[in-house]
Image (spheres, rainbow, N blue to C red):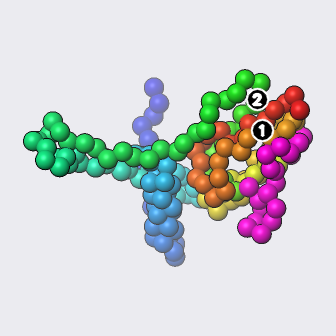
Amino acid sequence: MAAPRRPSPAPDGPGADERVVELARRVGGVLAELGLSEIEVEAAGLRVRVLRTPPAPTPAAGGAGPASAELEAVPRPVVSDAATPGLVTIEAPMVGTFYRASSPTADPYVQEGDAVKEGQVLCIIEAMKLMNEIESKIGGRVARILVENGQAVEYGQPLFLIDPRS
Protein backbone atom coordinates (compact mmCIF):
# COMPACT_ATOMS: atom_id res chain seq x y z
CA MET A 1 0.00 0.00 0.00
CA ALA A 2 1.37 3.39 -0.97
CA ALA A 3 2.07 6.04 1.63
CA PRO A 4 -0.45 8.89 1.68
CA ARG A 5 0.56 11.92 -0.35
CA ARG A 6 1.47 15.00 1.57
CA PRO A 7 1.02 18.44 0.04
CA SER A 8 4.20 20.17 -1.09
CA PRO A 9 5.38 22.93 1.19
CA ALA A 10 4.51 26.43 0.03
CA PRO A 11 7.29 27.99 -2.01
CA ASP A 12 9.28 30.66 -0.22
CA GLY A 13 11.10 33.72 -1.39
CA PRO A 14 10.34 36.79 -3.45
CA GLY A 15 7.99 36.20 -6.36
CA ALA A 16 6.83 32.80 -5.09
CA ASP A 17 3.16 33.85 -5.03
CA GLU A 18 3.43 35.20 -8.57
CA ARG A 19 5.00 31.92 -9.75
CA VAL A 20 2.15 29.92 -8.23
CA VAL A 21 -0.48 32.21 -9.80
CA GLU A 22 1.23 32.07 -13.21
CA LEU A 23 1.52 28.27 -13.06
CA ALA A 24 -2.14 27.97 -12.01
CA ARG A 25 -3.22 30.22 -14.89
CA ARG A 26 -1.24 28.22 -17.45
CA VAL A 27 -2.50 24.89 -16.08
CA GLY A 28 -6.06 26.24 -16.02
CA GLY A 29 -5.71 27.27 -19.65
CA VAL A 30 -4.56 23.77 -20.64
CA LEU A 31 -7.43 22.30 -18.59
CA ALA A 32 -10.02 24.40 -20.44
CA GLU A 33 -8.38 23.99 -23.84
CA LEU A 34 -8.32 20.19 -23.59
CA GLY A 35 -11.73 19.89 -21.94
CA LEU A 36 -10.29 18.14 -18.89
CA SER A 37 -11.95 18.22 -15.48
CA GLU A 38 -8.76 17.89 -13.41
CA ILE A 39 -5.04 18.36 -13.90
CA GLU A 40 -2.07 18.34 -11.53
CA VAL A 41 1.39 19.65 -12.39
CA GLU A 42 4.58 19.75 -10.38
CA ALA A 43 7.55 21.77 -11.60
CA ALA A 44 10.48 23.53 -9.97
CA GLY A 45 9.24 22.75 -6.47
CA LEU A 46 5.72 24.02 -7.18
CA ARG A 47 2.68 21.75 -7.25
CA VAL A 48 -0.61 23.02 -8.66
CA ARG A 49 -3.83 21.03 -8.89
CA VAL A 50 -6.74 22.57 -10.78
CA LEU A 51 -10.24 21.09 -10.73
CA ARG A 52 -13.22 22.18 -12.77
CA THR A 53 -16.73 21.26 -11.73
CA PRO A 54 -19.16 20.47 -14.55
CA PRO A 55 -21.75 23.13 -15.32
CA ALA A 56 -25.07 22.71 -13.53
CA PRO A 57 -27.85 21.38 -15.74
CA THR A 58 -30.16 24.07 -17.05
CA PRO A 59 -33.73 23.49 -18.16
CA ALA A 60 -34.19 23.50 -21.93
CA ALA A 61 -36.36 26.24 -23.41
CA GLY A 62 -39.98 25.34 -22.70
CA GLY A 63 -38.85 22.31 -20.69
CA ALA A 64 -40.79 21.03 -17.73
CA GLY A 65 -37.99 20.41 -15.23
CA PRO A 66 -34.90 18.30 -14.72
CA ALA A 67 -36.02 15.56 -17.11
CA SER A 68 -35.59 17.95 -20.03
CA ALA A 69 -32.29 19.43 -18.81
CA GLU A 70 -29.29 19.31 -21.13
CA LEU A 71 -25.60 19.65 -20.36
CA GLU A 72 -23.50 21.79 -22.64
CA ALA A 73 -21.05 19.65 -24.55
CA VAL A 74 -17.42 20.13 -23.62
CA PRO A 75 -15.18 20.28 -26.70
CA ARG A 76 -12.61 17.49 -26.85
CA PRO A 77 -9.41 17.32 -28.85
CA VAL A 78 -10.13 15.76 -32.20
CA VAL A 79 -7.97 12.90 -33.35
CA SER A 80 -8.07 12.29 -37.08
CA ASP A 81 -8.75 8.86 -38.55
CA ALA A 82 -7.71 5.73 -36.75
CA ALA A 83 -4.18 4.68 -37.64
CA THR A 84 -4.04 3.20 -41.11
CA PRO A 85 -2.51 -0.31 -41.25
CA GLY A 86 1.17 -0.17 -42.11
CA LEU A 87 1.65 3.38 -40.83
CA VAL A 88 3.59 4.13 -37.64
CA THR A 89 2.06 6.69 -35.27
CA ILE A 90 4.33 9.22 -33.56
CA GLU A 91 2.60 10.24 -30.32
CA ALA A 92 3.08 13.17 -27.97
CA PRO A 93 5.31 12.08 -25.08
CA MET A 94 3.96 14.91 -22.88
CA VAL A 95 1.26 17.54 -22.50
CA GLY A 96 2.17 20.85 -24.09
CA THR A 97 1.89 23.07 -27.15
CA PHE A 98 2.81 21.62 -30.56
CA TYR A 99 5.03 23.66 -32.88
CA ARG A 100 6.08 22.59 -36.38
CA ALA A 101 9.14 24.88 -36.47
CA SER A 102 11.83 26.20 -34.13
CA SER A 103 10.49 29.76 -34.42
CA PRO A 104 7.51 31.53 -36.01
CA THR A 105 9.65 32.65 -38.97
CA ALA A 106 11.50 29.34 -39.52
CA ASP A 107 10.47 26.68 -42.02
CA PRO A 108 8.65 23.66 -40.54
CA TYR A 109 10.85 20.70 -39.61
CA VAL A 110 8.78 18.42 -41.89
CA GLN A 111 5.90 18.61 -44.36
CA GLU A 112 3.51 15.87 -45.43
CA GLY A 113 5.32 13.75 -48.04
CA ASP A 114 8.83 14.48 -46.70
CA ALA A 115 11.26 11.59 -46.21
CA VAL A 116 12.51 11.31 -42.61
CA LYS A 117 15.26 9.35 -40.92
CA GLU A 118 15.14 7.70 -37.52
CA GLY A 119 16.08 10.31 -34.91
CA GLN A 120 15.21 13.29 -37.15
CA VAL A 121 13.41 16.15 -35.36
CA LEU A 122 9.75 16.32 -36.44
CA CYS A 123 8.43 19.07 -34.17
CA ILE A 124 8.73 20.79 -30.81
CA ILE A 125 6.40 20.48 -27.83
CA GLU A 126 6.59 23.37 -25.40
CA ALA A 127 5.90 22.36 -21.83
CA MET A 128 6.44 24.77 -18.94
CA LYS A 129 8.48 27.12 -21.18
CA LEU A 130 10.83 24.27 -22.13
CA MET A 131 11.15 23.39 -25.82
CA ASN A 132 11.27 19.61 -26.28
CA GLU A 133 12.33 18.29 -29.68
CA ILE A 134 10.28 15.28 -30.77
CA GLU A 135 12.20 12.86 -32.98
CA SER A 136 11.02 10.22 -35.42
CA LYS A 137 11.27 6.72 -34.01
CA ILE A 138 11.46 5.24 -37.51
CA GLY A 139 12.62 6.17 -40.99
CA GLY A 140 10.09 6.58 -43.79
CA ARG A 141 7.82 9.23 -45.30
CA VAL A 142 5.48 11.61 -43.43
CA ALA A 143 2.02 10.43 -44.49
CA ARG A 144 -0.05 12.78 -42.28
CA ILE A 145 0.44 15.58 -39.79
CA LEU A 146 -2.48 15.23 -37.37
CA VAL A 147 -2.27 18.47 -35.35
CA GLU A 148 -2.10 22.17 -36.19
CA ASN A 149 0.75 24.49 -35.31
CA GLY A 150 0.21 26.07 -31.88
CA GLN A 151 -2.37 23.46 -30.82
CA ALA A 152 -2.34 22.04 -27.29
CA VAL A 153 -1.64 18.31 -27.22
CA GLU A 154 -2.16 15.61 -24.61
CA TYR A 155 0.15 12.80 -23.57
CA GLY A 156 -0.22 9.94 -26.06
CA GLN A 157 -2.07 12.03 -28.67
CA PRO A 158 -1.12 11.03 -32.24
CA LEU A 159 0.96 13.74 -33.94
CA PHE A 160 2.27 12.16 -37.15
CA LEU A 161 1.68 9.08 -39.29
CA ILE A 162 4.89 7.75 -40.86
CA ASP A 163 4.92 5.28 -43.75
CA PRO A 164 8.03 3.11 -43.20
CA ARG A 165 7.67 1.49 -46.64
CA SER A 166 8.57 4.72 -48.46
Residue 85 drawn above or below residue 19: above
Between the C-alphas of marks 2 and 1, the distance is 8 Å
Specify whether residue 127 is in view.
no
Q: Position of residue 14 (x, y in %)?
A: 52, 76
Q: Are marks 2 and 1 in contact (CB under 8 Å)?
A: yes
Question: Horizontal placement of 22 versus 92: left or right?
Answer: left
Q: Position of residue 81 (x, y in %)?
A: 62, 33
* Tag 2 secondary structure: loop
Question: Horizontal placement of 84 versus 142: left or right?
Answer: left
Q: What residue is shown at x 82% (from left), y 62% (from top)?
A: 107
Q: Which residue is mark 1?
A: 143
Q: Position of residue 127 (x, y in %)?
A: 63, 55
Q: What residue is shown at x 44% (from left), y 47% (from top)?
A: 75
Task: Pick the residue in front: 82 or 103.
Answer: 82
* Magenta-drawn segment: 100-120
Amino acid carrying label 1: it is Ala
Q: Main secondary structure of the magenta part?
A: loop
Amino acid carrying label 2: it is Leu
Q: Earlier in the sequence, mark 2 or mark 1?
A: 2
* Tag 1 secondary structure: strand
Residue 82 drawn above or below residue 114: above
Q: Which residue is mark 2?
A: 87
Task: Pick the residue in front: 23 or 53.
Answer: 53
Residue 77 drawn above or below residue 15: above
Residue 64 image-quadrant placement: top left
Q: Is residue 30 magenta?
A: no
